[in-house]
Image (cartoon, helix red, strand yellow):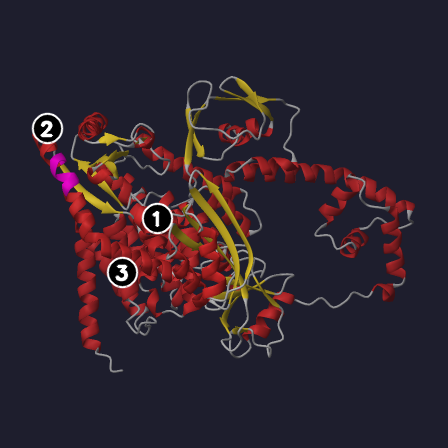
Amino acid sequence: MQIDLEAEKKEILNRYKNLIKACKRRLEKGDKEIIRKAFEVSVEAHKEMRRKSGEPYIYHPIAVAQICAEEIGLGTTAIVCALLHDTVEDTDMTLDDIKGMFGEKVSQIIDGLTKISGVFDHTSSIQAENFRKMLLTLSEDVRVILIKLADRLHNMRTLDHMKRDKQMKIAGETLYLYAPLAHRLGLNAIKSELEDLGLKYTNEDWYSQVVQKLEETEPVRKKFIKNFIDPLNDILKEQGFKFKIFGRPKSIYSIYNKIKNKGVPFEEIYDLFAIRIVIDTPAEREKADCWKIYSIITDFYHPNPDRLRDWISTPKSNGYESLHTTVMGPEGKWVEVQIRTVRMDELAEMGYAAHWKYKDAAAEKESNLENWLRRIREMLDNPDPNALEFIDDFKLNLFADEIFVFTPKGEMRNLPTTATALDFAFEIHTKVGEQCIGAKVNHKLVPLSYQLKSGDQVEILTSSKQAPKDDWINYVVTARAKSKIKSALKENRRKVSESGKEILEKKFYKCKLDYTIQNVNEFVTFLKLPSSGELFYRAALGNVDVKEIKEFVDFKLHPEKYKPKKKENKIEELVTNVRGSSDMLVIGDDMQKLDYGLSPCCSPIPGDDVFGFVTVNEGIKIHRVNCPNAVKLLSNYAYRVVKAKWNNDHLISFLAGIKIKGTDEMGLVNNETKVISSQLNINMRSISFDTEDGIFDGTIMVFVHDAKHLNHLIDNLMKVKGVTSVTRIDNN
């Protein structure tokens, strides 16, 4: 293919001009020059590089900088870092070069954005390690994460040109880590787009279905929104409000989640969109004016009292402020209405970055985000050596819904929804948590594991004799509490281990073995323990037997009796066997003498889009791409994932489950079984139906050849009178 270099140069300059236009409002003296310098350095560094699409690589840093400026609202330093973010990783340029040209701060941010290089322990995840490194830099500068999110967003927008397995891995990481992070930093628009694109590449069928349905229903939706808005427009103008009112469709991902989690068809989801009213009002009148508009709307449309959400009085911990109500609109349909000010709307869309603009006006709200960043710093002070565990703990605190609880003095604290009394104790202070013996919730005595609810007033009871126990880990959900408990337990083990040294020395003497560092280390290896600390700990608890020491003495005298068997690295061996030259596992191919099985968590059948996952003890497990566990596996253990496809030559029966719902019609069960057995000649393993108040709920386990066969059955069952929904069961 012929490349027009002149046309590309023009396009690069054009994109640069658009970037300058996007950040014009925030540019101060000298800013334009430094952005120009970063642009020229980046162009030069990437001049020979192209993306998978064939485009010049420089398009990517410019696009990331554009997202930072336009969609997140970041300033000059971040724009410079975005333009340079891949230079250290992908070119000959070093951090010292960056520091010399652009200063310490830019160099520090670029360091946080540069992936870790080198060899990693195969029990960990490179992605998890990279993520932890970013968070370490986050403790210094939050812009690292914001630029990283912009980078990930552009990569997701241009994922079409990647191979399928790469698409799945990147989309899996996005749904697992980056979308929750965008949510936590208040970047709602970016969070929604990352989720939608993540769904597009991990579950294309569902994504296409929802998009198609949204397109089909758009004219009806527009008409409904107009009928709903028109009378409100008139009243609000009469009252003298400066405002914008419009309908906003819900994200594809949130609609998909509702369909999956609530088991309702698309047609029955009432909140496909929300009406948003954004008012332009002075800071001192914000709260009063929002409630005024609420009053006007509820005078006109009947509200659902259970669906009022006041995030103006108590903002979410990511800074989100808004008043949400659900009202009965025209045609007997429920409609969500969001009421907020211009300031609140900007904070909701641009999140953390927008807080700098409103620093004085929203000092209290910003402290919520600062508190969250403080918690991350605390986690990083005591990071778990296992990066994956660290990420899981971190994630707990990203997406969790929140509750608001109060101290005895009336001070409000926000915690994740499933937080316990023990979580609250650690939230108050580490010492309070470590010495906690119970709590009083609303003046009633409760155990440490008691799950708190919004509005609870909590008093923590302590004792100086109390110390953290091993089972406390099971009582807490916040990363802060987990980290502090692990730290305390580790310290306690260390103290216990100290007393174990003396005990071990006496036992060695009894077995006529010299107590030397060499003998202790050799004994650790003999018992296959991780460290001498573990040996001393066991000795202190009385778990090191004289018999074991005697065996060790015998081993030193007669080592040939104890020759270890060769240990095989099963995971690496399996991955190598599968990958070989074709890089593909063919399911049902007898020529591949490999141990694989179908995963019970998603029960794949031929025709499903699948991948193989190499387990430690059970060979390769085949998972559906849209398996509930797929996102986590693809994100954290990508090196253990192998591509897989079905062998079409084999006609084998696979067990699949279907769920049927509908109204209780006479002879319905008989009609269903007729379709399955007589019309389609499908064998059933089991069938069960429950009926309550005229509604039936049934589960049928059937043997089918492939996904096409199963979908054909579902289509036929939907035609039976009285049936309202037929869905495949994701796990058996």
Foreground tag (3 vs 1): 1
Mark 3 surroundings: few (<14), some (14-19) or many (≥20) residues within 10 A: many
Q: What residue type is labelled 2?
A: Gln
Q: Which residue is drawn at 23% across and 46% down?
A: 248
Q: Does the magenta stretch include residue 305?
A: no
- Number of on-image labels: 3
- 375 over 729 or under it: above or below: above
Real-space Cα distance between discs 3 and 1?
A: 27 Å
The residue positioned 92% from the left and 49% from the top of the image is 512
Q: Quadrant of residue 361?
A: top left
Q: Mark 2 points at which residue?
A: 239
Place of residue 316 in the rendered image (x, y in percent of width and height, measured from the top left): 35, 35
Residue that badge 3 annotates: 63
Could you tell me the amino acid type at mark 3?
Ala
Q: Give the range drawn in magenta.
A: 227-232
Q: Which of marks 3 and 2 is nearer the N terminus?
A: 3
Q: At which x and y percent is residue 141?
A: 38, 46
Q: Is residue 571 left or right of residue 177?
A: right
Secondary element type, mark 3: helix
Residue 40 at what x, y percent from top left? 25, 65
Residue ID for mark 1: 254
